[in-house]
Image (cartoon, rainbow, N blue to C red):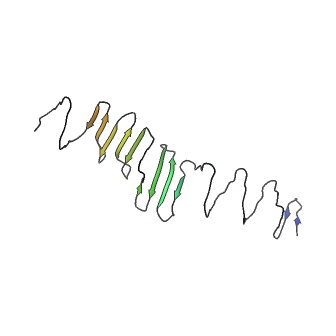
């Protein structure tokens, strides 16, 4: 039974069975939908919350806005976070547990492509190692710079201990030798 209201819209109080399909011009509003088969949507689809059980296949990029994370893993367990931080334009790969954050890379070759690459401590307040393609490479101990490569060689801060030395060229010593 169909009910045609005075404003022209049609109310269907029960189920609507259509063997040939339904064509809608305009917006279709429903409080729920159970689709047992394919859903073909052409154009933009805005879904506020989407839960997918099974495999998801895309034929193009998956775009996640800046400062939003792709989180893999259970909410209560270990998670892997992938995201781009707009402030500072940095990219993050973080494995988080309840007690720590780690950058974990498991590969036979790590080939970062960057003009500037650094490792910092867990608290992110001390440098450990810095590579600057247009400058020096620096190695730190407890946040203090100890070894720096320069265009003329290497600069070492602190004591150098070696079991032997083979010096090919001049040796200039300020101070005394034992």
Q: Is residue 132 or residue 167 the one in the foreground?
A: 167
Q: Is residue 39 or residue 63 the one in the foreground?
A: 39
Where residue 73 appears, x then y in whole percent? 51, 61
Q: Residue at x 75, y 63 (%)?
A: 30
Residue 61 seen by the camera: yes
Up/down of 76 relative to 166, above or below: below
Quadrant of the snapshot with the N terminus: bottom right
- Please give left or right for residue 16 compared with residue 105 in the image: right
Where residue 145 appears, x then y in whole percent? 29, 41
Q: Residue at x 45, y 54 (%)?
A: 94
Quadrant of the snapshot with the C terminus: top left
Which corner quadrant of the image does residue 160 belong to? top left
- Please give left or right for residue 35 compared with residue 25 in the image: left
Outermost residue, left side: 178
Q: Residue at x 68, y 54 (%)?
A: 46
Q: Residue at x 48, y 57 (%)?
A: 80
Where residue 123 appears, x then y in whole percent? 37, 52
Where residue 104 appears, x then y in whole percent? 42, 54
Residue 32 seen by the camera: no
């Amino acid at each position: 039974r169909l009910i045609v209201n005075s404003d022209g819209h049609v109310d269907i109080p029960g189920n609507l069975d259509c063997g040939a399909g339904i064509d809608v011009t305009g917006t279709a509003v429903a409080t729920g939908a159970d689709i047992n088969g394919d859903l073909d949507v052409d154009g933009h689809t805005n879904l506020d919350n989407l839960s997918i059980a099974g495999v998801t296949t895309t034929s193009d990029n998956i775009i996640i806005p800046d400062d939003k994370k792709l989180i893999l893993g259970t909410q209560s367990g270990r998670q892997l976070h992938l995201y781009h931080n707009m402030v500072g334009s940095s990219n993050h790969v973080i494995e988080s547990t309840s007690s720590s954050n780690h950058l974990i890379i498991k590969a036979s070759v790590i080939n970062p492509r960057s003009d500037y690459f650094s490792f910092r401590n867990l608290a992110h307040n001390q440098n450990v190692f810095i590579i600057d393609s247009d400058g020096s490479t620096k190695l730190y101990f407890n946040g203090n710079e100890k070894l720096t490569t320069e265009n003329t060689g290497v600069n070492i801060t602190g004591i150098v201990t070696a079991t032997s030395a083979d010096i090919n060229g001049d040796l200039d010593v300020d101070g005394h030798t034992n």
